[in-house]
Image (cartoon, rainbow, N blue to C red):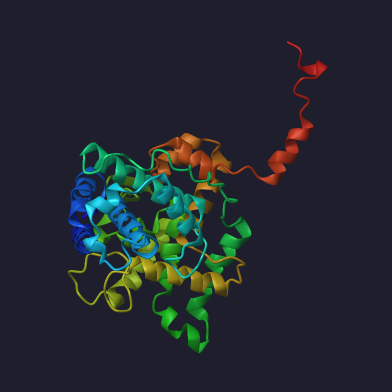
Amino acid sequence: MGKDSRYYAELRKDKLARITEIKKQLPIYTHKFIESCVRKYQINTALAYAKDVLLFFEFLKVRNPRCRSLEIKDISLEILDALNYEDINEFQEFMVLNESDSGHMVSNRTLARKMATLRNFFGYMADKEYIAENPTLKADKNQKYEENDIKRLDVDEAKRLIKAVEETKTSTKRSSARSKNTAKRDLAIVILLLNLGLRVSECAGLDLNDVNFEDNTIRIVRKGGKEAILYINEKTRNTLRDYIKNERPLLAQDPKEEALFISLKNNRLSVRSIEDMLKKYGDGAKLTDRVHPHKLRRTFGTTLYNSSGDIYMVADVLGHKDVNTTVKHYAAVDEEHRKSVANYDLFGDNNDN
């Protein structure tokens, strides 16, 4: 039930286990920093910090001559203490080429996040006097991330996506045979994402008792573990009710199963499965770009803002702690809006008070 459900407890347990495995690969003097992250941050953030620290030590093993013959866990504190800003700059160059990951380029935003980890890590090490100086202080500032155009579906594309799911129920293609067994479930997920802008993790984490048809609400667990109650419209309610009444009992063989969305393996549908499902229907709808859950979230957020003009309401519904995040990612100004500016003579004679 909500944030205290077995699903979220197991999710935290799994991520703590992954952090423990990462710590085993790292020098022992890094452990206190990672443990402090677990205490200070949400588990997802703590895991990301641990991964970034491991990545930096992988870089040292590849690029630092003193480390090439060592296991990562054997890289000494003396070596770390000898690093300077040039080593940090070299790490940034290493990440831009992403030599640790098949030669693909990484975005400036990803680099900025990893550099934030390094600044926190070395700041901690210097503050606790493990090292004499923080080498990130004099390092080059990584490039500012330039946000791409907001990726979202327009109204026609959203309708085509919904239609692609609906047509699965009547399709005669052999490739659609398995999808017919989950057509009501898939439609409920698409409608839910488009009408409430849920994160895919929030959607996957829903339990059956999180849906309240008397109040027309669903309870979700936000990023960071906070619970929220969202209201559903008639279309969303009817689609969910249809799935729960007519299809979920066929998928959930265990009557004690708590999950709302069930896979063909008769257990909770995973985040990855939802992503793959959306890609499949996006391809079926012949949409140009891949349909990812976050694209549906942005579609909801941008459409709601364009309809209401209330950025604070959009921020609240999406669960953003900082309204600036909402402004940056969802308050898109359409081309027609920009063109309309030409119709206003803001400082002409007719505007005299």
Residue at the farthest right position: 349
Q: Is residue 178 above or below residue 310?
A: below
Q: Is residue 51 above or below residue 135?
A: below
Residue drawn at x 78%, y 25% is 345
**Can residue 232 be seen at all in this image of the molecule?**
no
**Is the residue 323 above or below the residue 162 in the image?**
above
Q: Name the residue: 70% across, 45% down.
A: 335
303 or 53: nearer the viewer: 53
Residue sitting at the far bottom: 174
The quadrant in which residue 23 appears is: bottom left
Q: Residue at x 54, y 38 (%)?
A: 308
Left or right: 42 in relation to 109? left
Q: Horizontal and vertical percent for residue 154? A: 61, 56
Residue 245 shows in this picture: yes
User: Which quadrant holds residue 160?
Assistant: bottom right
Q: In which quadrant is the C terminus drawn?
A: top right
Measured from the top left, where is residue 45 in percent x and y? 31, 50
